[in-house]
Image (cartoon, rainbow, N blue to C red):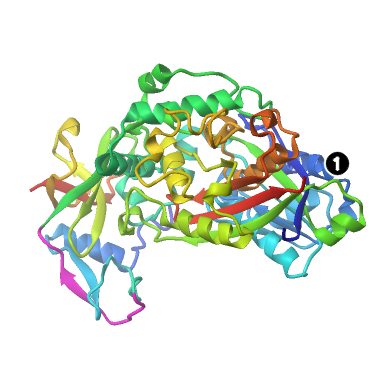
Amino acid sequence: MKDVRVAGTGLTPFGNTPERTSRDLFAEASIAAFEDSGVPRDDVEAVLYGNFMGELAEHQGHQGPLMAEAAGVQAPATRYESACASSGTAVREAVKRIRNGENDVLLVGGAERMTNLGTAGATEALAIAADDLWEVRAGVTFPGAYALMAQAYFDEFGGEREDLAHIAVKNHANALNNEKAQYQSAIEVSDVLEAPPVSEPLGLYDACPISDGASALVLTSETYADEHDLEAPVAITGTGQGGDRMALHDREHLARSPAAREAGEEAYADAGVDAGDVDFAEVHDCFTIAEVLALEALDLEPIGEGISAARDGRTTADGETPINLSGGLKAKGHPVGATGASQIAEVTDLLAGEHPNSDHVEGATTGVAHNAGGTVASATVHVLEVNR
Amino acid sequence: MSDSEHVPDAGFDEWLAAAEDGEGYYLECANGHGSLPPRRVCPDCGSTDLEEVDLPETGEIQTYTVTHVPTPAFEEDAPYATAVVDFGPVRLTGQVVDVDLEDVETGMRVALEITVSETTGERVIGLRRA
């Protein structure tokens, strides 16, 4: 096993708190991560922070140093922006720094304040993750772009809205026990099918909510963890990143995510595992169709078959490979810049037996986190393993 | 957008004007790859030898959606259909105009027709049934 340990995890509740600044949110998440890790703030050598829409949401650029300050850390700080994969890329950078010996202790995370923009404002802010000239000006919204992919998937591989609805139902069910989740309410397939359309074929319940929240991780080298006797059994053993053309219409495939495949293959090879070793995963289900594309890109489902995974129970909590035991973006919430690091936090807690849903993955050794930016023009994948 | 409203986007606004006159084009590199402006480098092969070539008259809808929750720039336009259209050398994203929303389908042949947003009056890439 390679030597990057997750020493501490911290999350704010994800939800609708328009009055809270992102500095307040990140402060709360970082306090939790430091308490969980037992690592003193003074030992942190750098802060790597993910955020997407800070300029639009709260007129705040240059958020790196602001967040270090909010966390009480005196260290250089940098913001990473890669749309919804912002903190996934921050984690990847942190892993590389610890591996190459540059750092032993890093604070990594992200935050996003979104609900203060309202639905129209947040829709506009999210849309800029697409190509402004060729997509946004043609009226493409973020749900609209995923709807284009969903329709392309239906046309190429079959499937229907009801298959997607099972994904939403599953992820809501998983969130019931997650006190940090935005929605802790069960829904039925009929609720999804009868919800108002957002961008057909996707309706309101096919989409993740607009959320406020923050995530934080204290990552350390194995040497530091051993020397300081940290209780940090979970390691990030594989990291990968993939890229694709910005506009959906410039991609070779409209119903696949090659960037996520590239990221997954790299992360698996890096960790020395393959898809068959994966016990469970947190994947980027900003829309129900996104979970399907993620499963296929990660080789957890064959191409064209991911659509039936939730309906047939392969990815439910008691299925073969539980997906999004946290509730996923769909029910846990999606404060964009916080999401990637929050997935690492969830996988860590699940592997460590410290998650409300850990019972569903008892004995699991390998978890995966998949974080996507835009219509997957960016993707990061991380493999986590636990020392038992 | 107040101050920048009248500043054109080099490459893109010229393309819109040409398309409005029925003279839509794409960029072709020395190796035959198609792409859309503004561009100095072919994204497929890195060639910097790009030439404007006439866009084929019609293309085929490859996927589409009907958007009910728009950004503020399309508030008055919703619901509207957006489609990705294959013109052969390039694909384009645009709004399907003058077709009942329920009649839009994959495989439909369309031609480029620049339209305007009902909300902002700005030019929008439109697609008319061919």
Residues shaded magenta: B45-57
Q: Position of residue A268 (x, y in %)?
A: 57, 57
Extreme residue in the left direction: B130
The part of the image, by quadrant, that contains residue B46 is bottom left
- In the rendered image of this protein, does residue A241 appear above or below residue A367? below
Extreme residue in the right direction: A228
Residue at horizontal 14%, vertical 37%?
A: B99
Q: Secondary structure at mark 1?
A: helix
- In the rendered image of this protein, does residue A165 appear above or below residue B111? above
The amino acid type, in three-letter code, at marker 1 is: Glu
Q: Which residue is at the front of the view, A385 or B95?
A: A385
- In the rendered image of this protein, does residue A148 appear above or below residue B111? above
Specify whether residue A63 is in view: no
Left or right: A8 in relation to A283 = right
Residue at horizontal 35%, vertical 26%?
A: A162
Residue behind mark 1: A35
Q: Position of residue A208 (x, y in %)?
A: 50, 33
Q: Residues within 10 Å of mark 1 (few under 14, many from 20)?
A: some
Q: Position of residue A292 (x, y in %)?
A: 42, 40
Predominant secondary structure in magenta? Answer: loop
Q: Which residue is at the front of the view, A330 or A311?
A: A311
Quick check: is B50 in the magenta stretch?
A: yes
Left or right: A142 in relation to A340 = left
Quick check: is A148 in the magenta stretch?
A: no
- In the rendered image of this protein, does residue B43 appear above or below residue A151? below
Specify whether residue A329 is in view: yes
Residue at horizontal 15%, vertical 45%?
A: B107
Chain letter belonging to callout 1 = A
